[in-house]
Amino acid sequence: MPSPITLALPDEAATAALAARAARLARPGDAILLDGPLGAGKSAFARAFLRAAAGDPGLEVPSPTFTLVQSYDLPLGAAHHMDLYRLEGPDALPELGWEEALDGIVLVEWPDRLGRFAPPGALRIALSPAGAPEARTATLAGWDDPRLAALAETA
């Protein structure tokens, strides 16, 4: 497993660019686990990822805070955006269709709620506020070396 990579994201455009690179590299069966405190940019990342993967910058991407799951048909297959903040524990995951969702791409906010269901090969992105209002630090871990290195490249 490659070492984690830390990136400075000076604004929301940089977060969106990282999400767009992740969308280009993602494939069915991938899990992307978005960790960080409230307001760290997890939803902004997921929204930018889904818009880039759909090839539609105007795609409506509502927060799954209350529905827990929003699903999308993308050119590369199904994607599922899950916000597990309100989930009391991993035992509720089967009711959300967790196993079926893993056939597509899953983006998970609050991945600590996954418990034993956390996929071992997932891309983990830890976001944290970094000074300026839109500035973030992203720590990337998981995926294999070539994909993680490609994700970390700024272009």
Image: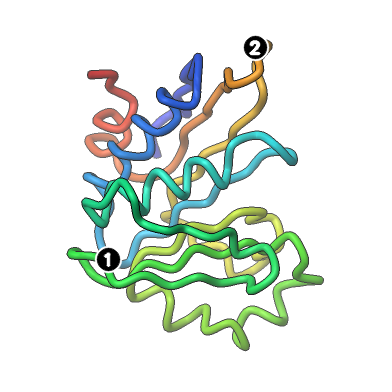
- Mark 1 closeness class: few <14, some 14–19, many ≥20 residues within 10 Å: some
Q: Position of residue 59 (x, y in %)?
A: 35, 56
Above or below 8: residue 110: below
Label 1 sits on residue: 28
Above or below 41: residue 81: below
Left or right: where does residue 98 sit relative to residue 115? left
The quadrant holding residue 19 is top left
* Amino acid at pointer 1: Pro
Quadrant (top left/top right/bottom left/bottom right) for the C terminus: top left
Q: Residue at x 65, y 65 (%)?
A: 114
Front tag of 2 and 1: 2
Above or below 15: residue 105: below
Task: Count the marks.
Answer: 2
Quadrant (top left/top right/bottom left/bottom right) for the N terminus: top left
Q: Residue at x 72, y 81 (%)?
A: 91
- Mark 2 closeness class: few <14, some 14–19, many ≥20 residues within 10 Å: few
Question: Between 86 and 139, which is closer to the camera in this rendering?
Answer: 86
* Amino acid at pointer 2: Ala
The quadrant holding residue 147 is top left
Q: Position of residue 102 (x, y in %)?
A: 41, 73
Left or right: where does residue 47 sit relative to residue 128? left
Q: Position of residue 149 (x, y in %)?
A: 28, 28
Label 2 sits on residue: 132
Above or below 43: residue 14: above
Mark positioned earlier in the residue sequence (2 or 1):
1
Q: Residue at x 45, y 52 (%)?
A: 32
Left or right: where does residue 13 sit relative to residue 89? left
Q: Cα distance, mark 2 to mark 1?
A: 35 Å
Secondary structure at badge 2 equals loop
Q: Residue at x 30, y 46 (%)?
A: 57
